[in-house]
Amino acid sequence: MGPELERLILLLAKVPGLGPRSARRAALALLQKRETLMRPLAEALAAAAEAIRPCSVCGNLDTSDPCGLCADQRRDRGTICVVETVGDLWALERAAAHRGLYHVLGGTLSALAGQRPEDLAIETLIRRVASGGVREVILATSATVDGQTTAHYLAERLRATGVAITQLAHGVPVGGELVYLDDGTIAAALAARRPA
Amino acid sequence: MGPELERLILLLAKVPGLGPRSARRAALALLQKRETLMRPLAEALAAAAEAIRPCSVCGNLDTSDPCGLCADQRRDRGTICVVETVGDLWALERAAAHRGLYHVLGGTLSALAGQRPEDLAIETLIRRVASGGVREVILATSATVDGQTTAHYLAERLRATGVAITQLAHGVPVGGELVYLDDGTIAAALAARRPA
């Protein structure tokens, strides 16, 4: 099959979402769409690798630094939403529910994975908040043990700054059916019940 | 998120095996492995798009024409295994069960999809067989309606050449459990039973 093809399949298999089997299928499909997909994808990968960098303020990925969100003067500079990953930031942006700024931690604290505070973008967050102008920090880490441990740690660290520190609400997902929900979520949704 | 990233995600989403959601995840992972995966993949895609071409004899994809299989003098030039796609050819090569040559049709006849004989590499197959030296043509099309229709059509067309025309056996897959098998396969396996 030739070294070029073997190498391509090997690399495609490392892309999250593709495995060895689907990498072969993808390579074949790409070769069959050489001009419409394969070459454009090669160029898009090279262009993005060249142009896209982490924002030195919030950690978002963008072609400009500060990123488009940090530079956007229409956004509320008084609220910072803290997320684990850029993927979480994108999810929140798609929901269009947060009109303030972000801060990407780069993961969670984790005893198991050996992730310590100094491995995350925590000091830069403390400095951002301490430098003034921030009214509220929204801790939007995952509702997992590590995510909640991280939120708790951040809340403690930020306490001294005096800004409001909030967390996402727990509850029934929109469109979610009770029968498929875990006990913890049901209990949390019940405890946080509100007038209908 | 910048036009470079949007364009990359759009193109990644078109790769078979990835959808819009996994394309975003893949783009993020690629940006995090910029030097070890993203740039190498861009280069591998460009190199493969440049170097790999269909073999003018059998339709296999390779960097040389005729392809490595067609050029390999150790292979039995008297048997041609007819497959639908290059992916099928690869699967047979991985099984290392066929030591002859191949012929890639480029699909199956299909009334529904409007695939006619002239849309497949059938005339080149007839010419290969008619040009002599071929003892056997193995029809290794899929065990689907379209695959079997195509095999039937090819058998008819090749009848006049006088070469042996064979088909893959039906039966219980190796490691397969009867309880999960369809009736057709069970019936075929029973009809083709052999001494234990």
Image (spheres, coloured by chain):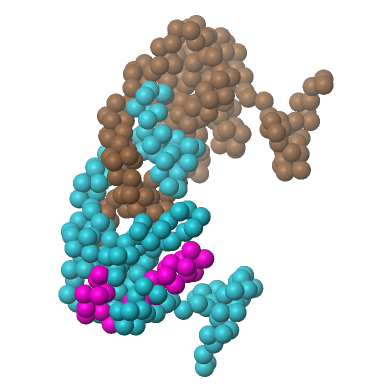
Chain colours: A brown, B cyan
- Count of numbered tags: 0
Give above or below for A192 relative to B20: above
Q: Looking at this view, is B68 or A4 the one in front?
A: B68
Please tell me whether residue B151 belongs to the stretch shown in magenta: yes
Q: Residue at x 33, y 49 (%)?
A: A32
Find residue A11 and report its horizontal and vertical position in percent.
Answer: 32, 49
Where residue B66 sits, quadrant-wise, is bottom left
Give above or below for A13 relative to A126: below
Give above or below for A7 relative to A75: below
Q: Residue at x 75, y 36 (%)?
A: A186
Task: State the residue lying farthest toward the front.
Answer: B160
Please give left or right for residue B95 compared with residue A137 in the image: left
Where residue B131 sits, quadrant-wise, is bottom left
Please tell me whether residue A23 belongs to the stretch shown in magenta: no
Find residue B97 and report its horizontal and vertical position in percent.
Answer: 35, 76
Q: Which residues are magenta?
A: B127-155
Q: Looking at this view, is A44 or A168 the one in front?
A: A44
Please give left or right for residue B186 compared with residue A74 in the image: right
Give above or below for B81 relative to A131: below
Does the rendering let one see residue B158? yes
Task: State the residue lying farthest toward the right.
Answer: A196
Q: Looking at this view, is A79 or B170 the one in front?
A: B170
Please give left or right for residue A64 compared with residue A138 in the image: left
Find residue A177 and report its horizontal and vertical position in percent.
Answer: 74, 38
Does the rendering let one see residue A127? no
Find residue B17 and report its horizontal and vertical position in percent.
Answer: 45, 48
Where residue B33 sits, quadrant-wise, is top left
Q: Residue at x 25, y 70 (%)?
A: B127
Q: Residue at x 60, y 13 (%)?
A: A164
